[in-house]
Image (tube, rainbow, N blue to C red):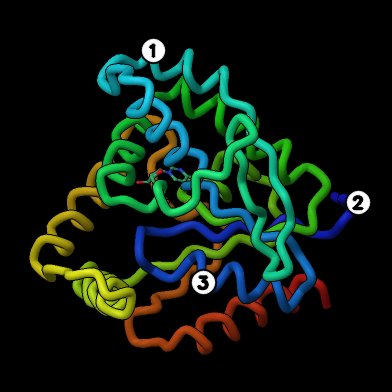
Amino acid sequence: MSRRNGLVISIDGTAGTGKSSVGRAAAEKLGYGFLSTGGLYRALAYTVFARKIDAANPDAVLKTAKGLVFTFERQPDATLKMFVDGEYLGDKLQLDEVGQTASKISTYAPARAVLTEKMREAGRDGGIIMEGRDIGTVVFPDAEVKIYLDASAEVRADRRVKQLQAQGVPADYEHILASIKERDLRDSTRAASPLKPAPDAVKIDTSAMTMPQVIDAVIKEIHKHAA
Ligand code: DC
């Protein structure tokens, strides 16, 4: 399939495997856009919370999802900056509670279908790396390059602790590890589009790799396709 602006490249995997850092860096090298699709689930979770909607009510969440207008603005670092109803939500989306609620509401198939359509619109013309859980399996099963990143829960918790400490935020390893395991279990066992590698995805275990090594491995895979 040929798309106007280039390939669609999917990077799926568990939380904390470096999907965003790797995707952004690879997109910058390729001159592609980069979209972290968890942001759409987080934005929905945040809106549900801000409007005091019951997150346990799939119909109310679906109605909210349908009403959201997403727009994206390409930044110099390749990131597609996301605006929700014209507003940039920024760091508010990174709160752990928002991530947990996003994981919960992402079990609702009808709300997923709405957000999936928005992702397809954003990637339709190609020239994009999209990071998420089901990009290679559901959102773009015809993506030209599919990557699946994984790492042990302990390594991911350790990375998260270091990341938070670098930001001056206190972090408790055991709490973070438990939260990662809880989210992994829910994301991979839900009935609607569970987290799993596409049959044609290239799987990379990043546990013992540095970020530059993972970026190199991903770029190599992309070049194999382009060669
Ligand atoms: O990648 P993240 O932590 O920002 O994602 C937040 C939640 O959104 C994650 O726990 C599961 C859900 N999600 C999803 O179901 N499908 C995607 N493509 C991206 C995220």
Q: Say left or right for 45 vs 131.
A: left
Q: Could you tell me if residue 173 is visible in this image?
A: yes
Residue found at x 17% / y 62%: 176
Task: Estimate the x, y position of residue 55 in percent, counting from the top left.
Answer: 29, 23
Near mark 1 (Cα within 10 A), the count class, few <14, some 14-19 or many ≥20, is some
Q: For disc 3, does the CB lie below 8 Å from ligand 1?
A: no
Q: Quadrant of residue 101?
A: top left
Q: Secondary structure at mark 3?
A: helix
Is the C terminus in the top left, top right, bottom left or bottom right quadrant? bottom right
Q: CA distance from mark 3 to mark 1?
A: 33 Å
Near mark 3 (Cα within 10 A), the count class, few <14, some 14-19 or many ≥20, is some
Between 74 and 130, the one lying in front of the other is: 74
Residue carrying label 1? 60
Q: CA distance from mark 2 to mark 3?
A: 25 Å
Amino acid at circle 2:
Arg
The relative height of residue 2 versus residue 57 in the rendered view (above or below) is below
Residue carrying label 3? 21
Amino acid at circle 3:
Ser
Q: CA distance from mark 1 to mark 2?
A: 37 Å
Residue found at x 18% / y 54%: 179
